């Protein structure tokens, strides 16, 4: 009963934020008028604004937020470590490196899915390296250290590639790939991200039973018929799909996968399987809210989403490190 | 060593550090008077005189290489690297600093100033006469100014108080950026561009290598405007600097204006 109320509340929050996101923008249009021209569509400039600017932006916030929340919850469930966030452990960074390489080499312009595929390949490499370095039960220390190393390396390589680009604008875009933004995106970006995000979501959702069983320990999970190597493989591919898809279109947005599962864990009785769905909804709500905030706080500047999520997430992260130390891990 | 004419005070071994002073100096300097221009002057995308620049030594605006050229005069822009300029001054090299041009009057002033700095006042006066004649021919009487949007990478637009805005006005067009309160230029969000409903669209030409900043010029909103409105893609080299090449930019935009009026009939 409590669970049903909780999930209904999350869905309601996402719906409300999605609608608010649709009616907010630099052009002053009445909320009712804007929603009417979105649905009815008279071919005028208002419809163009609603369908080609605001709708893709809101849809991408939903998609990217859901992906980040889901990936965070899945990795934390698998590693049984609350500090595993795709941004912190370098997976987003390596996805961004893949995307930047695809754009600068012309691979992304070559065919439609070139960009998300390259970001997926980058994310895949990132997850593999992190899991290899951290081991099956990554301790907080090795996990965070591996994340710092990968993030620094991918950040440096992104800067290098963009500084070497013949395009005078490229070097200024380092901050986009590091902090993320949904400004000026179009339905094209929704269509290239959607298939991979959905595939990843299906893969990660299939882990529900496995992650629940894993809370009892690896031996018990194996005794319950959970194939650990298969679970691991599914997790790696699922995470790479959702993070690759969202980073390719929005850059890397940190801390969503850390904050959302942390807040929602107590509401799902700390069951990692149920936390997956809750975190996907919570992540969508958080990114929608952040994207609304960047448009209200400094409407004339493209404030990056990662700035807001880090302002919320980093203090929580510090608190969690402090608590981890007290627990002697 | 080249002798710069009969005027003994005429500076020799002139080195220019700024794309705009590069071009004015190439146009006004006497034979052998100008020694070096900045590397930007060699880039055909930003420089209207990339071919001419090949005849000069290429510099990268670094104090060390400039000092080693032993210049008699250095030409710099107001926004040239201050550390470089102040170091050259400390080393005792005369530096003439030029403001950017924000209007056609500024263009005239820069030509005069460059003539004075190079001691080529007669050439500068001749250039001014030519400039005024050509400008007078271009400035047609207009009864109606079609509302035009200039749109660049990152959604950047230029208003009436910029050289690009003045080029637009001189060609007989009105600028929607100023309606949106961006008379000095700034970012015009896509939504504002779409709702401004301009009659013509002027966009920049993309640079090689991809960038997210320029993706906005292929956004469906801009694509729709480009397909439904008369418009043109402008080349940066005629628009960036206050030189007589702005007349070529005005000619291009005046041609666009004639197209708008024809399609409107």
Image: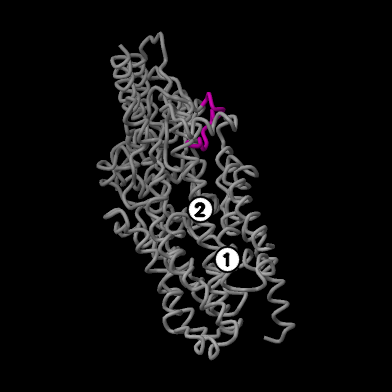
Q: Which residue is mark 1?
A: A257
Looking at the image, which residue sits at the far front? A1
Q: Nearer the viewer, mark 1 or mark 2?
A: 1
Looking at the image, which residue sits at the far right? A326
Q: Residues within 10 Å of mark 1 (few under 14, many from 20)?
A: many
* Mark 2: secondary structure: helix
In percent of width and height, residue A200 lies at 43, 65
Callout 1: chain: A
Callout 2: chain: B
Is residue A52 shown left or right of residue A112?
right
Q: Which residue is mark 2?
A: B84
* Mark 1: secondary structure: helix
Quadrant for the N terminus of chain A, please: bottom right
What span is colored magenta in the figure? B178-190
In percent of width and height, residue B179 lies at 53, 23
Quadrant for the C terminus of chain A, please: bottom right
Image vertical order of residue B185 relative to residue A119, above or below: above
Residue A190 painted magenta = no
Q: How many marks?
A: 2
What's the magenta bit mostly, secondary-structure-wise?
Answer: loop
Q: Residue at x 58, y 63 (%)?
A: A279
In percent of width and height, residue B200 lies at 37, 24
C-alpha separation, residue under disc 1 versus residue under disc 2: 47 Å
Q: Residues within 10 Å of mark 2 (few under 14, many from 20)?
A: some
Image vertical order of residue A249 relative to residue B131, above or below: below
Residue B188 painted magenta = yes
Q: Residue at x 41, y 57 (%)?
A: B65
Task: Locate residue B204: give its quadrant.
Answer: top left
The answer to which of A165 and B28 lies nearer the viewer is A165
The answer to which of A215 and B122 lies nearer the viewer is A215
Cβ–Cβ under 8 Å for marks 1 and 2 = no
Q: Residue at x 26, y 46 (%)?
A: B55
């Amino acid at each position: 009963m409590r669970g049903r109320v909780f999930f209904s509340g999350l869905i309601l929050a996402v719906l409300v934020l999605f609608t608010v996101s649709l009616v907010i923008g630099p052009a002053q249009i009445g909320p009712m008028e804007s929603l009417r021209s979105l649905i009815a569509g008279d071919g005028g400039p208002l419809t163009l604004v609603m369908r080609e600017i605001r709708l893709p932006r809101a849809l991408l916030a939903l998609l990217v937020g859901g992906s980040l929340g889901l990936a965070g919850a899945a990795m934390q469930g698998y590693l049984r470590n609350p500090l595993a966030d795709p941004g912190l452990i370098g997976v987003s960074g390596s996805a961004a490196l893949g995307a930047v390489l695809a754009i600068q080499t012309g691979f992304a312009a070559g065919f439609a899915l070139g960009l998300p595929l390259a970001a997926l390949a980058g994310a895949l490499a990132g997850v593999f390296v992190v899991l290899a370095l951290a081991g099956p039960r990554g301790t907080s220390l090795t996990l965070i250290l591996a994340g710092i190393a990968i993030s620094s390396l991918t950040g440096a390589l992104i800067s290098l590639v963009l500084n070497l680009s013949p395009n005078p604008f490229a070097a200024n875009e380092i901050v986009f790939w590091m902090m993320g933004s949904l400004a000026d995106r179009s339905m094209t970006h929704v269509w290239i991200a959607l298939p991979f995000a959905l595939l990843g979501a299906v893969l990660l959702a299939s882990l529900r039973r496995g992650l629940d069983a894993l809370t009892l320990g690896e031996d018990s999970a194996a005794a319950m018929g959970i194939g650990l190597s298969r679970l691991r493989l599914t997790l790696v591919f699922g995470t790479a799909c959702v993070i690759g898809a969202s980073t390719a279109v929005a850059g890397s947005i940190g801390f969503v996968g850390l904050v959302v599962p942390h807040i929602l864990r107590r509401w799902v009785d700390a069951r990692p399987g149920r936390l997956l769905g809750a975190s996907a909804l919570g992540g969508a709500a958080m990114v929608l809210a952040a994207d609304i905030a960047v448009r209200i706080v400094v409407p004339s500047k493209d404030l990056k989403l990662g700035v807001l999520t880090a302002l919320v997430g980093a203090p929580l992260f510090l608190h969690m490190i402090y608590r981890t130390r007290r627990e002697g891990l | 060593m080249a002798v710069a004419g009969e005027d003994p005070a005429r500076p020799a071994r002139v080195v220019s550090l700024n794309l705009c002073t590069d071009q004015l100096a190439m146009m006004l300097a006497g034979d052998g008077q100008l020694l070096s221009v900045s590397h930007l002057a060699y880039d055909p995308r930003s420089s209207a005189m990339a071919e001419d620049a090949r005849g000069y030594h290429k510099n990268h605006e670094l104090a060390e290489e400039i000092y080693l050229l032993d210049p008699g005069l250095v030409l710099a822009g107001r926004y040239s690297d201050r550390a470089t300029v102040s170091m050259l001054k400390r080393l005792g090299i005369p530096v003439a600093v030029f403001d950017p041009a924000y209007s056609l009057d500024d263009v005239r002033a820069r030509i005069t100033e460059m003539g004075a700095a190079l001691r080529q006042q007669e050439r500068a006066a001749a250039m001014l006469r030519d400039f005024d004649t050509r400008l007078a021919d271009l400035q047609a009487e207009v009864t109606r100014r079609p509302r035009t949007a200039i749109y660049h990478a990152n959604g950047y637009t230029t208003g009436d108080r910029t050289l690009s805005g003045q080029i637009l006005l001189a060609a007989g067009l009105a600028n929607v950026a100023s309606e949106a309160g961006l008379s000095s230029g700034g970012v015009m969000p896509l939504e504002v561009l779409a709702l401004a409903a301009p009659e013509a669209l002027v966009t920049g030409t993309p640079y090689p290598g991809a960038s997210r900043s320029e993706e906005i010029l292929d956004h469906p909103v801009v694509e729709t405007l480009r397909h439904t409105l008369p418009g043109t893609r402008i080349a940066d080299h005629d628009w960036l600097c206050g030189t007589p090449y702005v007349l070529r930019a005005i000619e291009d935009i005046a041609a666009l204006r004639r197209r708008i009026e024809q399609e409107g009939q």
